[in-house]
Image (spheres, rainbow, N blue to C red):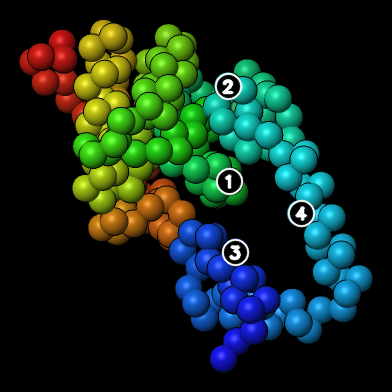
């Protein structure tokens, strides 16, 4: 039987999405092996990191500036890629396979929810769309990812007549997101991006 404190710690770490029980146990074991000063250092590092990290006021990328280095760079291509999370931007930047700008859209459209956050992000995205003729939606290809892209496409095509919207090609593994795609697959899915055609009611 694990101690009450172990269970409390386990419960807190379990709040981190996608960590398995085994991974949580490993982290706790690691903490036990650390010296007390290590733990204190880690504690203040996490706190300082949290205090110095903010969302870019234009694209929502997590960084330490009000406006991130990508949004401040005027030499970038006139393309906007809509990604699920800041980590996806890190991946594209690391691989150097894309030179446009980004927007972090960190929610899905959910048929069962009120979607307040979705529509807040749509408003932010619409303000940006005025400056772009090409948008690439880089959501994962799960049902909810596809539904989200369909909703964004519908809304943006209604308001922006000259806009072309693309999605990454189905070269991405089924249900696979940018985060888990290997570099070659990701480059191919960007090279072979699919033009999401307008339906007659979106013209
Ligand atoms: Zn930015």
For marks 3 and 4, the one nearer the N-term is: 3
> Which label lies toward us, 2 or 1?
2
Q: Residue at x 38, y 52 (%)?
A: 177
Task: Give x and y (percent) for residue 119.
Answer: 37, 23
Distance from Cα at disc 2 to Cα at disc 4: 25 Å
For marks 2 and 1, the one nearer the N-term is: 2
> Which label lies toward us, 3 or 4?
3
Q: What residue is pinned by disc 3?
A: 12
Q: Residue at x 84, y 55 (%)?
A: 44
Distance from Cα at disc 3 to Cα at disc 4: 15 Å
Q: Residues within 10 Å of mark 2 (few under 14, many from 20)?
A: some
Name the secondary structure under disc 4: helix
Q: Residues within 10 Å of mark 1 (few under 14, many from 20)?
A: few
Q: What residue is pinned by disc 4?
A: 46
Residue 75 visible here: no
Q: Residue at x 76, y 82 (%)?
A: 32
Q: Residues within 10 Å of mark 3 (few under 14, many from 20)?
A: few
Cβ–Cβ below 8 Å for labels 2 and 3? no
Q: What residue is pinned by disc 2?
A: 58
Horizontal relation, residue 157 to residue 200: left or right: right
Q: Residue at x 73, y 29 (%)?
A: 65
Query: Does the beta carbon at disc 1 come under 8 Å from ligand 1?
Result: no
Residue 129 placement: quadrant: top left
Task: Give x and y (percent) for residue 80.
Answer: 45, 26
Residue 46 placement: quadrant: bottom right
Q: What residue is pinned by disc 1?
A: 90
């Amino acid at each position: 039987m694990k101690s009450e404190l172990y269970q409390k710690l386990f419960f807190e770490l379990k709040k981190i999405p996608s960590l398995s029980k085994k991974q949580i146990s490993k982290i706790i074991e690691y903490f036990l092996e650390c010296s007390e000063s290590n733990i204190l250092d880690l504690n203040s590092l996490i706190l300082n990191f949290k205090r110095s990290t903010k969302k870019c006021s234009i694209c929502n990328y997590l960084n330490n500036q009000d406006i991130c280095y990508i949004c401040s760079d005027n030499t970038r291509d006139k393309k906007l890629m809509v990604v699920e999370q800041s980590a996806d931007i890190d991946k594209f930047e690391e691989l150097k396979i894309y030179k446009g700008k980004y927007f972090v859209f960190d929610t899905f459209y959910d048929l069962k929810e009120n979607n307040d956050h979705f529509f807040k992000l749509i408003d932010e995205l619409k303000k940006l769309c005025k400056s772009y003729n090409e948008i690439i939606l880089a959501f994962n290809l799960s049902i909810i990812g596809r539904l989200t892209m369909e909703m964004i496409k519908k809304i943006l095509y209604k308001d922006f007549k000259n806009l072309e919207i693309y999605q990454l090609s189905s070269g991405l593994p089924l249900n696979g997101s940018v985060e888990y795609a290997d570099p070659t697959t990701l480059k191919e899915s960007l090279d072979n991006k699919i033009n999401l055609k307008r339906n007659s009611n979106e013209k």
